[in-house]
Structure formats: C-alpha cells, structure tokens
Image: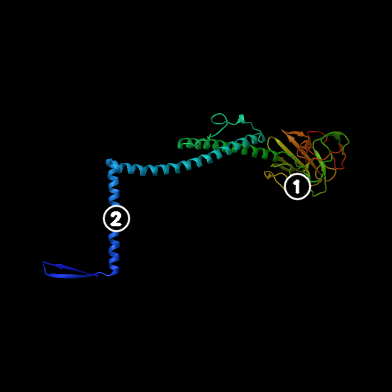
C-alpha cells in the first residue's frame, strides 16, 4: 500500500510505502492509545461523579462498593467464626488443664485454697455458640491469656513442691546400707557379747565379708570421717533436718568430710575395726542427736529384712553405756 501526500504550497508530493507489518503495528498502537484513553476517562468520570454526587455515576459507584464491602465482610466473618471456634477449643482445653492441675495439687500435698487465684474462682473465657464480634473475640483472647498465665504459675508451684518432695525422699535413709544382707542384731537392750552385761545396742548390725560395699542409705553431706576407738573407721552423713546416719567398723573408707554423696553410693567397705567381734557394718540413725531404730526407716523404704533376736550374730556387739561410742 502506498500513500501519496501532496503539498500544494511547495508543489511537491511525498510517497509513503505501508507494508502489512507496519499496518499491524500502527493498528496495535492506535488500539492501545484508545484503551488507555478509555480507562483514564472512566476513572476520571467515576471519581469526579462520586465526589460531586452525580445521580447516575453515584448510584453505580455505590453499587460497586457495596458488593466489594459485602464480599470483604463475608471474608472477615468467616475468619472471625473460625477464630472463635479455635478459641472455644482452647478454652475447653484450658478447663481440662485446670481440672488436671487441681488433681495434681493433691499429689503435691496442696489444696486449691492455698493457691491465690486472681479474680477469685474458676473459669476462663466464655465462647458462645453465636458469632462473635471483634471486640468480644479480643476479650475472649485476653481471658484465655490470663487463665493460661495462672496455669503456668500453678504448674511452677507444683513442680517446685514435687521436686522438693522428691529431694526429701532421697534424703531419708530408707535404703539398706549393705545389699542382700538382712540385719542381725536389732536396736534395743541386749547382753553385750564381750562383757556379758546388759547394754543398749544403738543401731543395726549387718554381718558381711570384709570388703563388702557399704552404701549410703540416703543422699547427704559427709560431716565426719575418722577413726574412733570403738566405732573404728567411721563415716557420718548429714541428711538435713538434723538427721544423721553413722557407718562403723569399716575396713576402708572411700569418702572424706565435706563430700556430697547420693543414695546408694559406695562410701566404704565392711571390716572389723574398733570394738568389734567380727566383720560387719554397724549402722545407726540419729535425729536431733537421739538414737533411733534404723529398722523403722529401712522398713519404710522396703529395704529392711527380718531382724533376728538380739545378740544372735557372732559379730554382735554393744557399748557399756548409751553415751559411749563404739556400739
């Protein structure tokens, strides 16, 4: 295709050759300009009409925006309903956790009255079956946060109390100081096997071979490790609350004063040092400096065996008087 342009003023003409490609590009450019112009005019008319309140344009704008707002509201309502359902599930689980915490209170030796509860009473966020507004949902979330904080505080108290109880149990001498050896001579008055006179036996005797491990009956701190004329090689362990255990006549001692020992730890070996008639362990328990029957402690832990009659073992021995060492 050729276009001939004639200029009458200068009496000359110009020829433009148009190929198919040039015509196509020109058409596309013209179409693009028309589209951009239409879009710009559309937005200008609608914006101006919306601002100035043109009757027809204003109605169209309200119709379009109403649909958009309705769709947005449906989307937000669906999300709020899902969040409310989740909050309801969390509130139900929080109630289960609260009931579980109250049951654990009994195991820790506490009662609900001993624990302060903010707001005075039980309960958390109430999530109704109807649709919740954003403000109601926010209040429910705040209530759940408050209840969860209370539960964390309660569980912290319970953990501390149960840990304290666990430690206290470990500090009570309920483990047999010699494994697989029933006690021989019992705590109490009997005939001294050396003097033949009546005397108080202040502990339990465990007859065993020399070198048999002596175990700590409970965890504690070694407060004495020495040789005593009557107790021989002796170890004393303080378990707190003025509770002390004593292990006498050892052939070898494996701990020293100031050492921390755990329940069941090997602290010495059986021997026959001091005032003794044969290899055995003499085991004592003292509370506030007063001798106690060790069998009661061992029986509480299921470690005590049957006690034979006083003085029935060859290694049994007693001290001439209660206050003297070397029983």
Q: Does residue 50 show up?
A: no
Q: Label 2 belongs to which residue?
A: 36
150 on left or right of 208 = left
88 on left or right of 9 = right
Secondary structure beneath dot 2 equals helix
Q: Residue at x 46, y 41 (%)?
A: 77
Q: Residue at x 30, y 65 (%)?
A: 24
Q: Does residue 198 show up?
A: yes
Q: Residue 80's spot in the image, x, y percent?
A: 48, 40
- How packed mark 1 is, by other alpha carbons closer than 10 Å (few <14, some 14-19, many 20 or more), is many
The picture quadrant where one finds residue 223 is: top right
The picture quadrant where one finds residue 119 is: top right
Secondary structure beneath dot 1 equals strand
Q: Residue 178's spot in the image, x, y percent?
A: 78, 45
Q: Which mark is residue 268?
A: 1
288 on left or right of 79 = right
Q: Nearer the viewer, residue 141 or 153?
A: 141
Q: Quadrant of the C terminus?
A: top right
Chosen colour scheme: rainbow
Q: Residue 185's spot in the image, x, y percent?
A: 84, 39
Q: Residue at x 65, y 38 (%)?
A: 162
Q: Nearer the viewer, residue 69 or 221?
A: 69
Q: Nearer the viewer, residue 141 or 85?
A: 85
Q: Quadrant of the N terminus?
A: bottom left
How much space separates mark 1 and mark 2, taking CA atoms? 99 Å
Q: Residue 124's spot in the image, x, y percent?
A: 55, 34
Q: Residue at x 33, y 43 (%)?
A: 61
The answer to whether the residues at label 1 and label 2 have Cβ atoms under 8 Å apart is no
């Amino acid at each position: 295709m050729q276009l001939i342009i004639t200029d009458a003023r200068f009496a000359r003409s110009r020829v433009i050759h148009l190929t198919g490609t040039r015509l196509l590009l020109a058409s596309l450019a013209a179409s693009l300009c028309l589209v951009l112009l239409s879009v710009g005019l559309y937005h200008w008319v609608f914006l101006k009409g919306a601002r100035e309140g043109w009757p027809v344009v204003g109605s169209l704008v309200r119709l379009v925006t109403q649909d958009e707002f309705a769709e947005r509201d449906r989307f937000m309502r669906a999300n709020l309903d899902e969040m409310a359902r989740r909050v309801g599930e969390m509130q139900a689980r929080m109630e289960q956790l609260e009931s579980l915490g109250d049951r654990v209170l009994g195991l820790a030796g506490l009662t609900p009255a001993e624990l302060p509860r903010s707001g005075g009473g039980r309960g958390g966020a109430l999530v109704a079956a109807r649709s919740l507004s954003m403000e109601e949902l926010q209040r429910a979330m705040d209530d759940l946060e408050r209840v969860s904080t209370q539960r964390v505080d309660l569980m912290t108290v319970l953990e501390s109390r149960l840990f304290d109880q666990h430690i206290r149990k470990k500090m009570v001498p309920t483990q047999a100081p010699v494994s697989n050896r029933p006690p021989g001579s019992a705590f109490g008055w009997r005939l001294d096997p050396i003097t033949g006179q009546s005397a108080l036996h202040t502990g339990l005797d465990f007859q065993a071979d020399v070198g048999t491990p002596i175990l700590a009956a409970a965890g504690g701190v070694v407060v004495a490790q020495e040789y005593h004329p009557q107790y021989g090689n002796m170890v004393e362990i303080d378990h707190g609350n003025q509770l002390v255990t004593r292990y006498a006549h050892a052939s070898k001692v494996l701990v020293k004063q100031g050492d921390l020992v755990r329940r069941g730890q090997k602290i010495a070996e059986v021997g026959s040092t001091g005032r003794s008639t044969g290899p055995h362990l003499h085991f004592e328990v003292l509370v506030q400096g007063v001798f106690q029957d060790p069998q009661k402690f061992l029986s509480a832990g299921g470690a005590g065996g049957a006690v034979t009659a006083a003085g029935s073992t060859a290694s049994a021995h007693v001290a001439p008087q209660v206050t003297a060492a070397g029983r």
